[in-house]
Image (cartoon, coloured by chain):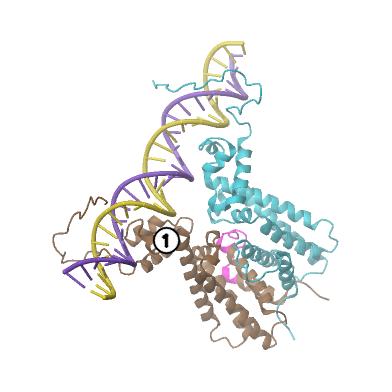
Chain colours: A brown, B cyan, C yellow, D purple
Amino acid sequence: MKKRILSSRARRGRPQTGRPRRPYHHGNLREAILQAALRLVETVGPGGLTLRATARLAGVSQAAPYRHFASKEALLAAVAEEGFRALTAMQRDSTRHKADPIEGFQALGLAYIGFASSHPSHFRVMFAPEVADKVAYPTLAEASAEAFGLLVDVIAECQRAGKVKEGDPKELALAAWSMVHGLSALVVDRQLSELYPVKVEEMARSVTQRLFDGLVLHP
Amino acid sequence: MKKRILSSRARRGRPQTGRPRRPYHHGNLREAILQAALRLVETVGPGGLTLRATARLAGVSQAAPYRHFASKEALLAAVAEEGFRALTAMQRDSTRHKADPIEGFQALGLAYIGFASSHPSHFRVMFAPEVADKVAYPTLAEASAEAFGLLVDVIAECQRAGKVKEGDPKELALAAWSMVHGLSALVVDRQLSELYPVKVEEMARSVTQRLFDGLVLHP
DNA sequence: CATTAAATGTTAACGGTGTCAACATACGCC
DNA sequence: GGCGTATGTTGACACCGTTAACATTTAATG
């Protein structure tokens, strides 16, 4: 039999008529912690995110997050998943009301880069090496696959309309994804800050256009 | 006047005729620590690198690295710089003996992706957000600029030979860099593992070729 | 060569971190 | 009402980055 020491400390005298005084059970801690992590990532960056700081921001004890996330990595995976869903939504939005499928294609790429440059830290978490074992987080893999699917679909549509060259849409999508992901990564990791004092959107348009038209002259 | 306690511990009896027994001063600790960090990064990844583990691997005390690197970030910056120099060398090698400048252009891209996929952790350090303030590490910025310069030069050469479309070489280089950097990042962050069970070099060839020829049909 | 300043390495400590075990409280179901 | 279980808290451990105080070696100066 185990001893039960240190029981029932500081019983509150009254029901505390003012505020109900944050009850012992939070109600929706998982969501609250996710939101706190989101906010922290956007402010201090992915490397600066701390499980303990997240708990403090959510107003709970240091170990409370472990009831909802198996580890810091799992929390980051959840943040990443949230990011892929937001990206997908933003991309879907961008293609709405585009008559020409080619315009939709380009809009998708611009939206990708737009998301990255407006939420750099969130973008970084989505591709952070700590969460690379996405097989361990199936819903994360699914969310990421959905974003890629959008791209494959619009390319196939362009091909049916005779606006894009033939070939496996997935292969073309990989080329397009590489391009916008590369520019996004360079922007997010501040690799271009002094090189090109140009607006990001301008770079994005230029770069995607180059991919559309090609670089090489064929006489 | 300060007390001098704990002085002169364990005087060695003899000059230790066998090995000279690692002297108090290492001789070339900076390089040794850099090498240790390199090895650690390649084994445990950039996030797993620890200043203390680096010191242990180099066989010195935990605080010794601080005589040569101002902080963990500075050590990472040195590792990154080393990476850019290795990348530049590998790229330079790849263009040697290429008669057609276009071939040299493509070889540069393939070498970039080859470096990334054969040294993924090192590649990640080179673009890690922790070292993003590259203004603080001028030699790092210089090493990275040199690699980009290689690309700009070969593009200008292709243009002079009438093999590549006109335009600011730096702008074209940005498109090319984005593409190979994007594919590299996706490979390195294992974003394609199940999507494309194809050899990386095959993907690299396909993707760069798509950039050369363009995606769009112009009737 | 003898002194001594500077460079280089060590030890010990501080606050912070991820994680876990033991414990406390509240919810929901019988 | 009683009780199992989910949820939250406390306290501890090992490890980390960083710094201050101290030790040892090298190099410069006479």
Give the left or right position of residue A132, taking residue B5 as reference.
Answer: right
Residue at x 73% of width, y 51% of height: B89
Pointer 1 indicates a residue of which chain? A
Residue at x 82% of width, y 69% of height: B162
Disc 1 target residue: A40
* Residue B78 position in % (x across, y down): 60, 46
Whether residue A82 can be seen here: yes
Q: Nearer the viewer, residue A136 or C7?
A: A136
Q: Give the quarter of the figure containing the N terminus of chain B.
A: top left
Residue A148 placement: quadrant: bottom right
Which stretch did the figure color magenta? A186-202
Whether residue B133 can be seen here: no
* Residue B186 position in % (x across, y down): 62, 65
Q: Is residue A138 above or below residue A56?
A: below
Q: Main secondary structure of the magenta part?
A: loop
Q: Nearer the viewer, residue B174 or A197?
A: B174
Residue at x 54% of width, y 87% of height: A97
Q: Is residue A118 magenta?
A: no
Q: Nearer the viewer, residue B85 or B110?
A: B110
Give the left or right position of residue D30, taking residue A89 as reference.
Answer: right
Please tell me how many numbered marks the rendered image carries: 1
Give the left or right position of residue B178, taking residue A27 as reference.
Answer: right
* Residue B15 position in % (x across, y down): 62, 19
* Residue A8 position in % (x across, y down): 20, 55
Residues packed near mark 1 inside 10 Å, few (<14), some (14 to 19) or many (20 plus): some
Residue flagged by tag 1: what amino acid is it? Leu
Circle 1 — which element?
Answer: helix
Q: Is residue A9 above or below residue B74?
A: below
Q: Farthest residue in the left direction?
A: A13
Q: Is residue A191 magenta?
A: yes
